[in-house]
Amino acid sequence: MQIRCYRCNWNFAIKRDEIAFVLEALEESGGNHYDVPCPRCRTTNRISIEQMRRAVPRPPSEAEIEEEVKEEEEGMPEGESIEKEEED
């Protein structure tokens, strides 16, 4: 997620892992924003929960997972399994 500091206009990013962790913590505590310090000027920038939810990809639904499994099974001949090839 790209963020622009409101004070110095510096662009910086927050990783998806961090956003997912923060969302989980905010939902448990009932918070409504996350304070991110700018790495350049150290000004605190507020990010709303809604902005963070849009930045994190949604987990696949059960129907999407089942569809992927079926496609993999159809493409593989019967009796074969996925094996790692040994390097010579």
Image (spheres, grey):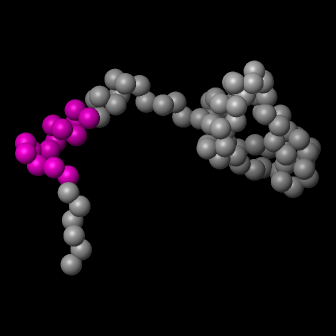
Q: Is residue 67 left or right of residue 47?
A: left
Does residue 64 sit above or below 4 in this rendering? above
Residue 26 is situated, as x and y percent measured from the top left of the image, at 72, 28
Extent of the magenta region: 69-82
* Quarter of the figure with residue 47: top right
Residue 70 colored in magenta in the image: yes
Does residue 34 sit above or below 38 in this rendering? above
* Residue plotted at (20% across, 57% down): 83
Quadrant where the N terminus is found in the figure: top right
> Which of the two residues, 7 or 31, is positioned nearer the viewer here?
31
Residue 38 is situated, as x and y percent measured from the top left of the image, at 84, 48
> Which of the two residues, 83 or 74, is positioned nearer the viewer here?
83
* Residue plotted at (21% across, 78% down): 88
Q: Is residue 59 left or right of residue 65?
A: right
* Residue plotted at (35% across, 28% down): 64
Residue 40 colored in magenta in the image: no
Q: Is residue 7 left or right of residue 76?
A: right
Q: Farthest residue toward the top? A: 30
Q: Is residue 56 left or right of residue 83?
A: right
* Residue plotted at (22% across, 32% down): 70
Residue 32 is situated, as x and y percent measured from the top left of the image, at 78, 23
* Quarter of the figure with residue 78: top left
> Which of the two residues, 24 or 10, is positioned nearer the viewer here?
24
Q: Farthest residue toward the front? A: 28
Q: Farthest residue toward the left? A: 78
Residue 60 is situated, as x and y percent measured from the top left of the image, at 43, 30
* Quarter of the figure with residue 69: top left
